[in-house]
Image (spheres, rainbow, N blue to C red):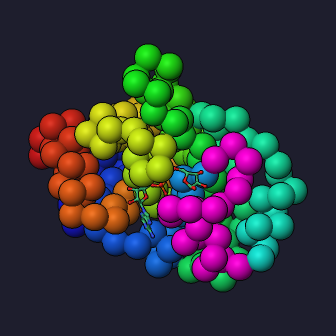
Amino acid sequence: MITRHVFQTDLTLKKGDITEESTDAIVNAANEHLMHGGGVAYAIAKKAGSILEEESRGIGYVPTGSAAITSGGNLPAKYVIHAVGPVWRGGKSNEPQLLRSAIRSSLELAKKHELKSISFPAISTGIFGYPLKNAAREMLSETLQFLRENPGELKLVQFVLFTDLDFETFKQELVQLIPE
Ligand code: AR6
């Protein structure tokens, strides 16, 4: 685990399973139709139970680069924020802007609902194929920008990484962005 205290918020990276996190919200790496069929989305939907599926159906469509909120059902987290990151198409289809926008939309939703803590997975880096290192840099720097513009709004923003490689890659990028 590694933490940087920035703009009155703890920005933490840890290795783990995001479905076990008890932050106010966990973020889901969703698709535009909120069909939670694979990856971390499946794990979240399964553990949350039918309320998450029902609320997702009620929301319907969420465009790439934005996010929507449902309750967390049986999860320790009260809410699930469904962020739709881009499918990687080689890097010339606005992927960085769309990924940053998915992060920004999630943080704005947390702020709007007066949440104090939020956990993100490594959005777009699994089934959607976004190169890990680039994705880590975009997600962390967009988070920092949000925290700079909204000091003290959130107490904790954490990235919960599933594999050693994911954790180490995020760590390298964080240390580059905020050396100490
Ligand atoms: N906790 C934390 N991270 C996890 C967990 C977990 N329990 N399980 C997997 N990961 P992915 P995407 C990591 O593929 O690329 C779904 O079908 C995983 O190792 O879940 O945004 C959706 O419905 C990887 O690092 O999301 C969409 O259709 C990261 O979560 C599509 O996949 C994201 O991988 C979204 O693809």
Quadrant of the rendered image containing residue 36: bottom right
Residue 16 appears in the rendering: yes
Percent coordinates x, y for residue 92 in the rendering? 44, 17
On whether residue 32 falls in the magenta region, the answer is yes
- Judge whether 77 appears above or below 67 on screen: below
- Judge whether 32 appears above or below 13 on screen: above
The residue stretch that appears in magenta: 31-49
Give the quarter of the figure containing the N terminus: bottom left
Residue visible at 21% across and 57% down in the picture = 165
Name the residue at the top extreme: 92
Residue visible at 54% across and 53% down in the picture = 29
Residue visible at 34% across and 65% down in the picture = 162
Q: Is residue 120 left or right of residue 66?
A: left
Residue visible at 50% across and 20% down in the picture = 94
**Total marks drawn?**
0
Residue 150 appears in the rendering: no
